[in-house]
């Protein structure tokens, strides 16, 4: 019997629009940050726009976001940016991505745009809220290092803040998402099949039912499970920090005053260890009990995860979130304990007008998550809307002619028109 199709979507380009308005102009813009990091973006215009809407994600290509045609037709310019790690977040340092955003903000202000709106979609929500929180923090109060403890002083950058923020189908942070989805039953990080059956959500003894019947997990199991997930994140953090500290140890030797006097063989060994790049292989990251138990964070979603209708099998594939990371990338991006890109932490310091858009059938972001963003927001002008759609704005099978991307576009455009003129 062949295996079922594991991927939920047939293509990775589903964040993109199918076509752009024929009367729109599109300009590729080179973006160089103040630390000389390189990124790029595409500016879409029709002419005369006073407000530009920005999209960015830690790794995804947002230069043809599916909302772009709607926004252009409504009179808004659109800037879709790729960060310095396009298509692959294996080494992504969120703190450095803020420099990419800062550089693009300066370019857009110099182009004459009077208003800038961030639309943080999916991982873009935590990225943009992280940037905005740092941008409104006056120097010298900004961060001066990365999550790994490497020096990186955000106080040295000019960081213009945005005028408004839209949180669109955005989780609470990549690290916060993974903390709920990582498999705590892994007992050996070097063995992808190692398993503690008492912590296996896909073990029928713990409440798992044969797909596609809903599972039902007890409160005691869920409490142990969540605690074990956090413990595994802490374990991975410790591995990452140990690898970084070992590298720093040899870097200190290479910088020591007597290094040049050492025998060549010793210097050769130290030099190799000082620059040695290592990778973490993180097994089984598709294990949130909410994927199979609809009573957890109830919503309009159907069975499975954002990546697969069979998370019990997809959990063991080589694909998925955070599977291969550098230690520094892990700490800054996917660690729920170490990453600073946490929406709830950052939005508490953001007072710009804020709109939260929740997709009711999202397999990754639940209404309770979006409501938490709203409640933590420091803005006095804040609103939440719920749209019937899945994570990528596609209509729900139960409501094929309702909601979806057009409804999301209408809600965002109406909200912006009340606050920021298009032209």
Image (cartoon, rainbow, N blue to C red):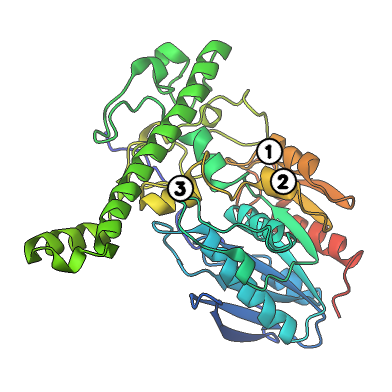
> Are the two marked residues, 1 and 2, in contact with CB atoms closer than 8 angstroms?
yes
- Expressed as whole percent of the image width and height from the top left, the position of residue 214 reads 53, 22
Disc 2 is placed on an element classified as: strand
Disc 3 is placed on an element classified as: helix
Q: Earlier in the sequence, mark 3 or mark 2?
A: 3
Picture residue at 39% right of the left edge, 56% below the top? 90
Q: Residues within 10 Å of mark 3 (few under 14, many from 20)?
A: many
User: Is 412 or 83 nearer to us in this picture?
Assistant: 83
Q: Is residue 339 above or below residue 421?
A: above
Q: Residues within 10 Å of mark 1 (few under 14, many from 20)?
A: some
Q: In the image, which is nearer the foreground, mark 1 or mark 3?
A: 3
- Expressed as whole percent of the image width and height from the top left, the position of residue 232 reads 41, 30
| Residue behind mark 1 | 369
- Expressed as whole percent of the image width and height from the top left, the position of residue 314 reads 38, 39
| Residue behind mark 2 | 358
Q: Earlier in the sequence, mark 1 or mark 2?
A: 2
Picture residue at 69% right of the left edge, 72% below the top? 69
Q: In the image, which is nearer the foreground, mark 3 or mark 2?
A: 3
Q: Residues within 10 Å of mark 2 (few under 14, many from 20)?
A: many
| Residue behind mark 3 | 331
Q: Is residue 9 above or below residue 316?
A: below
């Amino acid at each position: 019997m062949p295996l079922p199709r594991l991927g939920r979507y047939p293509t990775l380009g589903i964040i993109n629009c199918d076509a752009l308005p024929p009367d729109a102009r599109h300009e590729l813009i080179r973006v160089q940050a103040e630390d000389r990091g390189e990124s790029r973006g595409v500016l879409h215009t029709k002419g005369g726009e006073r407000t530009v809407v920005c999209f960015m994600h830690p790794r995804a290509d947002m230069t043809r976001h599916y909302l772009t045609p709607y926004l252009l037709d409504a009179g808004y310019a659109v800037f879709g940016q790729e960060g310095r790690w396009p298509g692959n977040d294996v080494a992504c340092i969120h703190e450095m991505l803020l420099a990419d955003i800062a550089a693009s903000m300066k370019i857009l202000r110099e182009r004459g745009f009077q208003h800038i709106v961030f639309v943080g979609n999916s991982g873009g929500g935590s990225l943009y809220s992280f940037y905005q929180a740092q941008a409104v923090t006056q120097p010298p109060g900004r961060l001066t290092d990365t999550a790994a403890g490497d020096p990186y002083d955000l106080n040295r950058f000019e960081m213009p803040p945005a005028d408004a923020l839209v949180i669109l189908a955005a989780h609470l942070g990549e690290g916060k998402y993974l903390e709920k989805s990582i498999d705590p039953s892994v007992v050996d990080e070097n063995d992808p099949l190692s398993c503690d059956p008492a912590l296996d959500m896909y073990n029928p003894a713990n409440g798992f039912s044969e797909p596609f019947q809903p599972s039902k997990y007890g409160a005691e199991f869920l409490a142990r499970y969540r605690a074990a997930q956090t413990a595994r994140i802490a374990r991975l953090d410790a591995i990452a920090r140990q690898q970084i500290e070992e590298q720093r140890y040899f870097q200190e030797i290479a910088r020591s005053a007597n290094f040049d006097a050492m025998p060549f063989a010793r210097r050769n060994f130290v030099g190799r260890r000082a620059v040695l790049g290592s990778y973490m292989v993180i097994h089984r990251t598709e294990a949130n009990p909410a994927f199979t138990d609809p009573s957890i964070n109830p919503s309009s979603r159907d069975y499975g995860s954002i990546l697969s209708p069979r998370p019990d099998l997809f959990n063991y594939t080589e694909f998925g979130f955070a599977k291969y990371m550098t230690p520094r990338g892990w700490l800054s991006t996917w660690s729920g304990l170490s990453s600073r890109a946490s929406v709830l932490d950052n939005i508490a310091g953001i007072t710009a007008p804020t709109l939260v858009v929740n997709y009711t059938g999202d397999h990754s972001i639940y209404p309770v998550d979006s409501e938490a963003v709203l409640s933590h927001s420091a803005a006095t002008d804040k609103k939440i809307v719920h749209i019937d759609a899945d994570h990528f704005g596609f209509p729900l099978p139960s409501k094929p002619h309702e909601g979806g991307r057009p409804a999301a576009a209408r809600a965002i455009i109406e909200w912006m028109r009340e606050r920021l003129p298009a032209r």
